[in-house]
């Protein structure tokens, strides 16, 4: 790819080139969705990403997460499954010609959450299916379309004989959905840039997100024969009691006076979710043990340590108030997210320039959003000196049934990212690699 | 074992002979408890029972449950695990000499319920441990001590050169704890007698028991991302809502006006137990599916069909009243107990004569009991023309933690059963088999 003298290209041409890749973008997304890249099963999709990056002429850096390296990092979350054989993939663009612009990271996560009851899906969740503008499938919106968008944005420039005039890192990471350790490992490997964009399907430009804490609540009860059930204290009942007491904290944090400013007008910013439960042993025995997997959100001006302390205090009070506490016990196990939130300055160039780019191309303002969940953007913002936002293709039912992404939205984001990349990084003229 | 002319033996001698077997009874019980005869894993214990019966000179009939044979029986309950390799064992005593008395069945179940959280046990649940009068272990009271008691009662007579003068059937059956199909299969094989005693650890003489119905409640919810949890309807929440609505039926049935007479003074006869729950997929997703395993009790004057109808109606009403019902669904799966209750006439000879025998030996009345659970006695009483009661060694924490049985109680029951057998069946003089 020898560079030649830069010749100006019009942004209209970039937009057009992006939309010309619609078929290729959809095929890439279909292939990605067809890989059931659930936690621990990301490697098929990651191998495809490595091939895809290589085919675009990017240098491919593929590496396993080394838990030794990240464990002491303040952004580390206790992992759930081992990292052997599960790699991050980074496609690295280094300008051949003069470096003129600013560097950029595109980051996307390859992992998807469980499908839930497959019987509820109208199409098999890992069989991508198009209906009109919608591409259905688990992970279609969250966030394989985002990965397709940033990849196709690069391909669009390439199709015009252009390449960014500064380093651009295309990261496809594992484990965003439970720890973020994939993105953290990229940070620890040394990846930094002047900004990062994560094409998550959140609508607008996401500049603020909440902290998220996961924990398991394991309780032991006082089992008895079901024929005298009222004389025992079931572990399931006790778990639900503890969770209902904990929910008072959710309610408290949601009260207008207690809200962080970015969530002042949100319907219900703080959500405590009992996502999973397994308890009891036998229909005719009062349950002896129960485990609940819980996710809580907390505001960006709180941190993990304080969230833990408040949870622990709430549970301790609930326990102390239980009349049968002497027959009961519980313990908290911290597994998964221990993620602080952040609130990026809206004057940050990544926000203002991306918003302007969007306005210029789409003709509408790009609204800043405060997200009630967590994304990998936290690592860049909190620990990476790399201002990061989320802006990506939108759809519906992420973490739900019949998840879909809008193909029009995918192509619009592709166009915006291509133009933004050209603006942010500058471009050099290249000879496109053969076959592109 | 040629018989000789009967010579009268004193009942005091039988009692003494029974107590002389204390060491042997405890060893037998220890061996039984050491077999973890959980559902589907009964065969080690059953092999031991077959050997034990054979060593006493009983003819051993060992047979698998043939589901084809029992499926159409009104006492059948839908099974949970296949029956291959899981046998009932019957030790058959046929008098060599003249048949003078009435025939008798002793029945006990070899299966035990799950231990619950083993960490709660002070001794490993399948490592029988004696502390003073207590023998600890899962199944010690429920009801391996009962099996040891009826076996040792026979051995006690034998040690005196006596044997029952009528047929006695010693049944060790599987699956009392979830279907009763083991005892039902004995019935279908043709076993009948003038009475049956099941040495269950229920205290007094149990002459009345409730019906029990098991079912699984499978629900599907409307999963969403935990960050917007309040916009979905979680399957766990929906399950708990349905169960809480169902509990109103429990409350209704427990009201004094609605009670069956035998439970008029009981603290809480009707118990609906959510014994097991498994729901949700991911801490950060609102749960899509949940399964609850539920056990309900109902009075002997109700039957399974009516209990089902009331449960189904209660769930249908609850569903109809749920504001988000259009996003929700549920189904009932009937697995395990579909057991009617019974109430045996207190004038039945098995009740009056066993009670008198107990009074004569122990010097206290044997109180009739109405049990709030189910036992295999139902099959004998309802379908077998064989009046049946429960009377057995007592202990504590059946289906709970640190289950134990009183060894003194075991020996007292052994003595009472030995004397009762002699009275009910009459005795013939025998030459004890070698080694006894």
Image (cartoon, coloured by chain):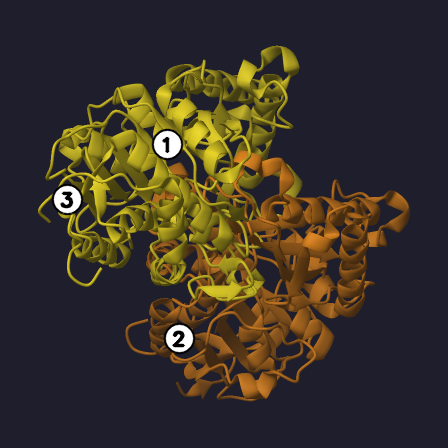
Chain colours: A yellow, B orange
Q: Residue at horizontal 45%, vertical 13%?
A: A301
Q: Nearer the viewer, residue A255 or B83?
A: A255
Q: Earlier in the sequence, mark 1 or mark 3?
A: 3
Give the secondary structure at mark 3.
strand
Residue at the spot of label 2: B53
Indicate the chain on which mark 2 is placed.
B
Image position, residue B182 (x, y; %): 53, 74
For the question of whether residue B407 can be seen, the reply is no
* Farthest top residue in view: A257
In the rendered image, the vertical position of residue B322 relative to residue A424, given as above or below: below
Query: Residue at (18%, 43%) from the top-left corner?
Result: A429
- Determine which of the numbered discs, if any, sits on residue A337 in the image: 1
- For the C terminus of chain A, the image quarter is bottom left
The 10 Å Cα crowd at callout 1, few under 14, some 14 to 19, many 20 or more, is: many
> Residue A348, located in which quarter of the rendered image?
top left
Q: Residue at x 48, y 55 (%)?
A: A407
What label does residue A102 carry, if any?
Answer: none
**Measured Cα–Cα span from mark 3 to mark 2:** 65 Å
Local packing at callout 2 (Cα closer than 10 Å; few below 14, some 14-19, many 20+) is many
Residue B368 position, x and y percent, is 72, 53
Name above or below for residue A379 compared with residue B358.
Answer: above
């Amino acid at each position: 790819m020898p560079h030649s003298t830069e010749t100006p290209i019009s942004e209209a041409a970039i937009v057009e080139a992006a939309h010309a890749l619609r078929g290729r973008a959809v095929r890439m997304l279909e292939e990605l969705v067809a890989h059931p890249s659930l936690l621990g099963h990301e490697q098929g999709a990651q191998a495809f990403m490595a091939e895809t990056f290589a085919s675009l002429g990017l240098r491919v850096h593929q590496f396993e997460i080394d838990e030794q390296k990240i464990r002491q990092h303040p952004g580390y979350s206790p992992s759930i499954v081992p990292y052997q054989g599960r790699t991050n993939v980074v496609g690295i663009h280094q300008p051949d010609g003069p470096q003129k612009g600013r560097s950029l990271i595109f980051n996307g996560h390859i992992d998807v959450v469980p499908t839930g009851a497959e019987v509820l899906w109208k199409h098999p969740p890992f069989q991508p299916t198009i209906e009109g503008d919608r591409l259905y499938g688990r992970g279609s919106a969250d966030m394989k379309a985002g990965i397709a968008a940033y990849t196709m944005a690069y391909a669009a420039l390439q199709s015009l004989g252009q390449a960014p005039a500064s380093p651009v890192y295309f990261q496809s990471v594992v484990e965003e959905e439970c720890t973020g350790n994939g993105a953290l490992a990229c940070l620890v490997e040394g990846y930094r840039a002047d900004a990062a964009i994560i094409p998550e399907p959140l609508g607008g430009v996401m500049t603020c997100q909440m902290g998220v804490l996961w924990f398991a609540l394991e309780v032991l009860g006082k089992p008895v024969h079901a024929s005298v059930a009222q004389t025992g204290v079931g572990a399931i009942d006790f778990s639900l009691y503890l969770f209902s007491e904990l929910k008072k904290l959710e309610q408290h944090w949601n009260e207008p006076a207690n809200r962080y400013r970015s969530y002042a007008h949100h319907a219900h910013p703080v959500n405590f979710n009992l996502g999973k439960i397994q308890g009891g042993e036998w229909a005719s025995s009062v349950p002896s043990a129960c485990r609940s997997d819980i996710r809580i959100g907390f505001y960006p001006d709180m941190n993990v340590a304080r969230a833990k302390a408040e949870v622990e205090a709430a549970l301790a009070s609930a326990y102390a108030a239980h009349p049968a506490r002497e027959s009961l016990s519980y313990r908290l196990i911290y597994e998964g997210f221990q993620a602080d939130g952040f609130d990026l300055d809206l004057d940050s160039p990544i926000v203002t320039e991306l918003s302007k780019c969007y306005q210029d191309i789409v003709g509408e303002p790009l609204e800043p959003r405060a997200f009630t969940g967590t994304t990998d953007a936290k690592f860049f913002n909190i620990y990476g000196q790399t201002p990061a936002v989320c802006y990506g293709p939108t759809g519906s039912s992420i973490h739900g049934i019949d998840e879909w992404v809008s193909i029009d939205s995918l192509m619009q984001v592709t166009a915006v990212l291509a133009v933004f990349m050209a603006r942010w990084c500058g471009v050099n003229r290249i000879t496109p690699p053969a076959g592109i």
